[in-house]
């Protein structure tokens, strides 16, 4: 059984969703970033952390890629052109959506007060919406890669929830429909029930 270490309100949710999609049992050990428990497994102190027996994997995207490759699902095979396109989408989401949200979040409440630049949120909101439109223009079907639900879908759908919580509104109707499809998946419903 896998152990996910982190908080379900963090990027650990992505890993939990992935494990639900795979039908793999897991336990969640709630731990805050920078806690002693997390630092013992990941010197950066960042969550999530996945324990697979005695092995430890860090970073939500690395964890999901590891699991997708291990089980041969929610991904295209390494070395295929489809995988190259999938990896390009993953990197695009991390660079242009996730990182924009992370910068705004850090300047909102994580950085020391004297290091925060509150006005960065305005630019971040504009950048988020612009980047989201470009990403939706690349969408090939019901999911980013067409009919196949893959790792970048979990990342982007999670970012959609993060953006809503961070009050980054989006009027993008394509994105709203996309999120609805992703959230209708059985694994997501099971994970968020109750």
Image (tube, rainbow, N blue to C red):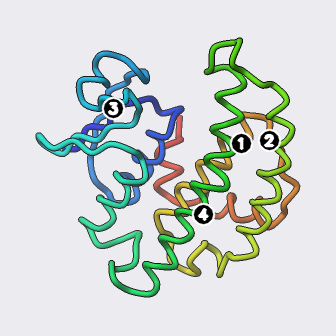
Q: Residues within 10 Å of mark 4 (few under 14, many from 20)?
A: some
What is the C-alpha distance between the residues marked 2 and 3? 27 Å
* Residue 168 image label: 2
What is the C-alpha distance between the residues marked 3 and 1? 23 Å
* Residue 5 image label: 3
Name which residue lies at 84% across and 42% down.
Answer: 123
Q: Residues within 10 Å of mark 1 (few under 14, many from 20)?
A: many
What is the C-alpha distance between the residues marked 1 and 4? 16 Å
Query: x, y (%) of residue 4?
Result: 32, 37
Task: Tell which tag, 2 or 4, sits nearer the viewer.
Answer: 4
The first of marks 2 and 4 along the sequence is 4
Which is nearer the eye, 126 or 22?
126
Q: Secondary structure at mark 3?
A: strand
Q: Is residue 166 left or right of residue 88?
A: right
The image quarter in which residue 92 lies = bottom right
The first of marks 2 and 1 along the sequence is 1
Q: Which residue is mark 1?
A: 163
Q: Secondary structure at mark 4?
A: helix
Q: Secondary structure at mark 2?
A: loop
Q: Residues within 10 Å of mark 2 (few under 14, many from 20)?
A: some
Q: Which residue is mark 4?
A: 92
The quadrant the N terminus occupies is top left
Q: How many marks?
A: 4
Q: Residues within 10 Å of mark 3 (few under 14, many from 20)?
A: many
């Amino acid at each position: 059984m896998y152990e996910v270490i982190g908080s379900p309100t963090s990027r650990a949710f992505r890993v939990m969703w992935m494990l639900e999609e795979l039908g793999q049992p897991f336990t969640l050990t709630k731990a805050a970033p920078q806690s002693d428990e997390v630092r013992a497994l990941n010197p950066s102190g960042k969550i999530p952390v996945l324990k697979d027996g005695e092995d430890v994997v860090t970073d939500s995207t690395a964890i999901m890629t590891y699991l997708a490759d291990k089980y041969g699902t929610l991904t295209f095979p390494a070395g295929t052109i489809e995988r190259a396109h999938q990896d390009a989408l993953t990197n695009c989401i991390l660079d242009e959506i996730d990182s924009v949200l992370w910068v705004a979040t850090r300047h909102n409440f994580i950085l020391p007060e004297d290091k925060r630049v509150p006005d960065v949120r305005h630019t971040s909101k504009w950048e988020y919406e612009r980047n989201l439109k470009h990403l939706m223009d690349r969408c090939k079907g019901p999911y980013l890669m067409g009919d196949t639900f893959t790792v970048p879908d979990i990342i982007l759908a999670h970012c959609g929830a993060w953006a809503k919580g961070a009050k980054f509104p989006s009027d993008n109707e394509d994105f709203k429909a996309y999120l609805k499809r992703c959230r209708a998946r059985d694994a997501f419903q099971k994970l968020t029930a109750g």
